[in-house]
Image (cartoon, rainbow, N blue to C red):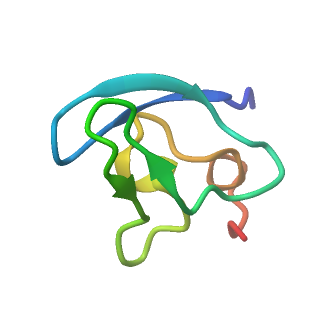
């Protein structure tokens, strides 16, 4: 299985989208929107900002493992 290493994060406040590389060995709990500067945090039940706001789930979830 090929792991996708980039995801497009969409800011829920302003709708700004940006493709970002995902860390392969850790979770990213916070992400600052480049456009409106709001700090994104994972939604309840998600392990990281990529799982909540990205087009692709984080590498750990893609591998079928628990994240963090």
Q: Residue at x 56, y 27 (%)?
A: 20
In the image: residue 23, left or right of residue 20? right
Give coordinates of residue 47: x percent, y percent.
55, 67
Q: Is residue 19 above or below residue 51?
A: above
The quadrant holding residue 18 is: top left
Left/right placement of residue 55 relative to residue 20 reads left
Which of the 4 image quadrants contains residue 3? top right
Quadrant, the C terminus: bottom right
Q: Which residue shows up at 34% across the image and 44% down it? A: 37
Is residue 41 positioned above or below 37 on the image? below
Residue occupying the point 79% across, 43% down: 24
The total number of labels drawn is: 0
Query: Percent position (x, y) of residue 11?
Result: 27, 41
**Would residue 24 appear left or right of 11 to someone viewing this image?**
right
Image coords of residue 22 (percent x, y): 66, 37
| Closer-to-camera residue (68/28) | 28
Quadrant housing the N terminus: top right
Q: Position of residue 10 (x, y in %)?
A: 30, 36
- Find the residue positioned furthest to the left: 14
Quadrant of residue 27 in the image? bottom right
Q: Residue furthest front?
A: 37
- Residue most toward the bottom? 44
């Amino acid at each position: 299985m090929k792991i996708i290493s980039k995801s497009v994060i969409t800011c829920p406040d302003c709708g700004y989208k940006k493709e970002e590389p995902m860390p392969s060995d850790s979770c990213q709990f916070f992400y600052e929107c480049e456009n409106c500067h709001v700090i994104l945090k994972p939604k309840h039940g998600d392990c990281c900002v990529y799982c909540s706001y990205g087009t692709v789930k984080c590498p750990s979830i893609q591998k079928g493992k628990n994240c963090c």
